[in-house]
Structures are given as C-alpha cells and as structure tokens.
Amino acid sequence: MTPHAPLRVVLVDDHRMFRTGVRTELAEVAPVGGLDIVGEAADVEAAVAVIRRVEPDVVLLDVHLPGGAGRGGVDVITGCAGVEALNGEPVRFLALSVSDAADDVIAVIRAGARGYVTKSISAVDLLTATRRVADGDAVFSPRLAGFVLDAFGAAAGEVAEVDEELDRLSAREREVMRLIARGYQYKEVAKELFISVKTVETHVSSVLRKLQLSSRHELTAWAMGRRLI
Amino acid sequence: MATPYARPSTDTLVPGPRFVRPREGRVLGGVCIGLGEHLGVPVRVVRIVVVVLTVLGGSGAVAYAFLWALAPAESAGMVGVPAARAYAGAVPPARPVTEETTARDRSAALLVLGAFVAAAGGLLALQRSGVDVHAGTLVPLVAIVGGALLAWSQLGEAQRTRWVAGSVGDRRMGVARVVAGLLLSVVGIVVLVTRGRSLAALWDAGLATLAVLAGAALVATPWIVRMWGDLRAEQVAAARATERADIAAHLHDSVLQTLALIQRRADNPTAVAQLARAQERELRSWLYDAPSGEGDSLGASLTAVAHDVEDDNGVPVDLVVTGDRPMNGSGTALVRAFREAVLNAVRHGSPPVTAYAEIGPSGVEVYVRDHGPGFSLDDVPPDRLGVRESILGRMDRAGGSARIRRLDQGTEVALTLAPSEGAPS
C-alpha cells in the first residue's frame, strides 16, 4: 500500500442524494489527494460494470440495490469476484446501509464484504473505515460486534477451545468484540487489552473470517434468509 | 342514489342488483323478493304471478324451485349492494376480480338453465313428432340435472370464500348441499341405468355407474383445480391489497406527519435532527421488527429507556443489546440506574453516546459511554447525590455493582448484576 497514491473509491447506492452527500462529506474531511471517488453506480449491473472498468481500491456498497438477481449488494460482490485494484490487491467492499437487520448484515459479510457500517456514520469515521478496509482490515460497527457476539453464542459464554475453531470466538476475540460493541475505537481497544492496534486488527479480521466461513446455525439461517446458500 | 334499485340502468358495470335470496322478509325461500328486486318489480306482483302459475298447471312451483336452487342466499357481506359498489370505487385492485367472477357465475348459471329448458323443449318436440321417449328416461335425467344444478349453484363466489374462511357451521351447510346434489345425481344415474332390468343385471348397472362417475370426475377435475387456483389468486390479491393499505396507513400516520413537522421547523436544526432520528427509529422498528422498547424483557426495557432519553434530549444514544431475559426486581433497579447513567452521558458528556448491554447466564453487564471531557467520582462534591445514590447505591442495594471509569476521551459507567440474580431462590 503506497500512502501517496490517493485511495480510489467507487460509490454504489441507488439514491442519488445519498451519493452526493457522501461525496461532499468525504471531500470535506479527506486530505487533498487522499481520496478519489472514481465512479458511481445506482444498480447492480452498472456497479459491476463500473468496478470492472475502474478497478478501485474500495467500493462503498449499499446493501439494498435494484437489479441483478434481487440480492442487492451480494450480487455486486459475487459479480466482481476476482477483480483486482491497480495495486494488485483484491477490490475491497465496505457495506453501507440504512438497514441493520441481522440477515442483511450477515448476508453481505458472508458474500465477502470487509466491513459493515450504517449510513448514520460520521464522515470522519467513514473515511477511517474506508482506509482500514483498503488496507485489508475489517471494520466492525458496535452493532455488528453485537450481532457477532449473539451469533457465536459469545454473549451466552461460549468460548472456543482453540483459536482455529470456526463456530465459536476465542476468548481474546470475544474481548475485542465486546469492547467494540461498547463503542471503543481500535486504538482504545488496544490500550484496554494491552495489545497493539495491529493485533486488534488481526483479531477483528479473524472474527470476520469466522463470520464468513462458520456453519453455525444462526449464521446459516440468516444467510439463507437472503438466499445466499 | 336514494333508490338504487329503481334505476338499475344508471350503473353500466352491474346491470341491476344481483339475484339473491334475502334473509329478511321471506315467506318461503326468499325467491320472490329476490326476483322482484332483481327485475325492479314489486314483490307482491311477483308473488301473485307465481301463485297463479302454480295453480294453472304447476309451472310456478317448478320455476320457484329452480330459482331457489339457483340463487344463492344473501350473505352478510352482500347486505346493501350499493355499499359494496362504493367500496369498489375506493379500492380498485381488489374488487373488479370479484365482480367479474360474480358475472361469470351468473352467466354460466343462465347458460345451464337455458340448456336445460332447450333440452326439455327438444324432448317434447321429439315426442310430438312420433319418436318414443320414455317418461321413465326423463325423470332420472331431470334428477341428474337438478342435482347437478343444486350442487353447482351453491358454489357462488361468496359461498366459496365462506367455505375456506368461514365458520364450521357455514362450511358444513355448503358441503351438505353439494353432497345432497351429488346424491340426487347418482340416484338418477342408477335409476336410469337399471330401469327395466332384473336385479341380476344390477352388477352391470353398478359397473356402468362407476364408469359414469369416473367420467364425471375426469371431466370435473380440471374445473375444480381451476376454481381452487382462482380462489388462491383472489386470496393472495386480497392479502396484497390489505398489506398495501397497511403500509400506506402507517406511512401516512408516521412519516408524512414527521416530514410536515420537519418542514415547519426547518430553521431549527436540533429539532429537525431530533424529529428525523425519532422517526428513523420508529420506522426501523416497524420495518425490521427491532425491539420496540415495549415489553417485559430486560433488553426491551433498556431499549425503551435509551429511546426516551434520546427523545427528551435530542442526543442519539446507540444501544446494542445481546441476549435477553425477563424483567425482575434487580432488573428494574438496573434499568433505573441505566437511565441515570445515560442521562448523565447525554447532559454532561458529548456525543456519540454508546451503550452496550450483555445479558447472559454469567450475569448482566451494561456499559454506557460518552466522549466528553470525562469526570471522576472524586471530583463530584459529596453532597451531590445523583451519581452516588441513583447509580452506585441503587446497584448495591440490588445486589450488583456499578463502576465509573474515566477514559482518555469520555467516561464509561459499567453496571453489573451477578448471575444468581433473577433466578428465584
């Protein structure tokens, strides 16, 4: 990741007003040459075409979109499988939605999105989240962390014996998720747990991987709600 | 439309009141009233004509019987045909289907009746011209057709709906009628087949009857399947219309009202943000079935508190709840302490205010966090009871604990209840 090249972002949302708003807000908070919105799309077909053409670093993706097979953002992610950004990294998706319904969230994450934030997020936080996703890390909102804790039974005290176990969180991952659910930033989590921010990011990415691969009943049920399996 | 029945031609869609047998004011089967209303003729005239025709050769009685079998009884939903038409104007998508079905039913009924009369006329003509038509053949034929008519005519649109959705009594009545009609037909067929033969030939007759029944079933199956399909389609359409009306009503009551308020208070950004936030939350809970803040569970109560504080102060409170359990005494204390903590965060801290509640077998943990300058309990003068009493003291008395932490940015209040709390011991 070269810090000098501006982050190339594609904005996919079927509401023009919302696209304009995000574009303006990001332009206000991003340093000059830091972020470049290189494309916009309002439906699944247009989004896949634009992403394949401009090969951006990050796609800010609405979960509910017209077109495709009717699965919205999930269709965009599957339609862009294998597309790489200019620097050779895979194109990363950050889901951006008004809906915080569990099945929407889980479906788009399992399809391959690196994070999930709601549209009420502040511009500064959105910029941070976009950067984080571009670096290949995961972005968890407090609400997504809450879902994860619920879905893996971590809130009920289930903890994985070994870290590699896919159906449960490890004790450390659970701690990280709980702190994120409490509204802590990554660096605050790191300070609280006496670990580095990089380690926090590793834990979060590991949770994201479990979220995408686990066959826990709750997760598969949610994903099936969006006809993902 | 003071006298809708007097001028039936004004309505081009439905050329007169539907021929039904009213439940009220009937002498025998309500046929004369229905016929009178249908034709726009006074009931008395109809009755006199029927009686006279009955005395002179009995054709009046026959006609009465046929009309009785043909016309469905008036159902509760059909009382007042004009009202139904007014409804048709208000909700276009649902009603035309029904009107169409009704018209089709009636035209089909007339067709069958016409065919029957034509057949009778044809038979008479044959007899006149010298061909020998046994009266013994005629009677079973009449029985068959009459039975079929009886069964068929009861399958009006209103009845079909009632069969599926109606009470058990209605359904039983309708089934009884159809069964009676079918029995009549079967008896007619058997008599027709066995006529003039010995009992030994009854076996053949039985076979023939079976063959006829099988044939009839074969012929009727597509029709029954189609009828069932029509019924399902109607039900789906009605459900869709209801859902659409429900959504429209909800949007009107909530979203449109809020938008109007927002326009009127456009010069006050705080108020607008507050309105938008409250509306968003309400719509979200309606769309996604999120916790509405109503109910007896601990999670719902915490959600309600967060919503209240948010509404009263205009500061968003992001609450994430995992797990849940029913309310109890210590839960109530926890909810009150939580309200106090959120109020403090909203008033003295700065946004974003986030809260996290973890309700599990290992107890309940609730965190409230703001991003203000932060405060420590030592800075609070001892005579200020807000935090000490309503958060710390309250949690102590409920058998739990409260802890206030100053972070680099902001303050976090942690409320905990032990797991044994809540299980009645």
Image (spheres, coloured by chain):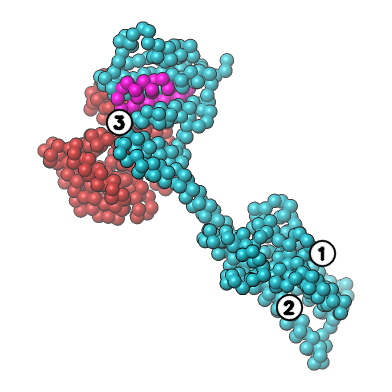
Chain colours: A red, B cyan
Residue B62 visible to the viewer: no
Q: Decide which of B190, A182 is in the foreground and name it.
A: A182
Position above or below: A163 against B379: below
Position above or below: A65 against B10: above
Q: Nearer the viewer, mark 1 or mark 3?
A: 1
- Magenta region, residue range: B338-361
- SS at circle 2: helix
Q: In this figure, which residue is indicated by the disc labeled 2?
A: B116
Q: Decide which of B56, A19 is in the foreground and name it.
A: B56
Residue at image point 53% right, 18% down: B329
**Badges 3 and 2: C-beta atoms under 8 Å apart?**
no
Badge 2: few (under 14), some or many (20 or more) residues near its Cα, within 10 Å? some
- Tell me how far mark 1 sits from mark 3, CA to CA: 81 Å
Q: Earlier in the sequence, mark 1 or mark 2?
A: 1
Q: Which mark is residue B28?
A: 1
Quarter placement of the N terminus of chain A: top left
Q: Nearer the viewer, mark 1 or mark 2?
A: 1
Callout 1 amino acid: Leu
> Horizontally, is B97 left or right of A138 in the view?
right
Instruction: From the top left corner, tell me how far across and down residue B90 is, in percent.
Output: 53, 58
- SS at circle 1: loop
Q: In this figure, which residue is indicated by the disc labeled 3?
A: A204
Residue B12 visible to the viewer: yes
Residue B344 within the magenta-colored segment of the rendering: yes
Residue at image point 37% right, 8% down: B383
Position above or below: B417 against B240: above
Callout 2 amino acid: Phe
Which chain hosts label 3? A
Instruction: From the top left corner, tell me how far across and down residue B123 is, in percent.
Output: 78, 85
Instruction: From the top left corner, tell me how far across and down residue B39 is, in percent.
Output: 70, 73
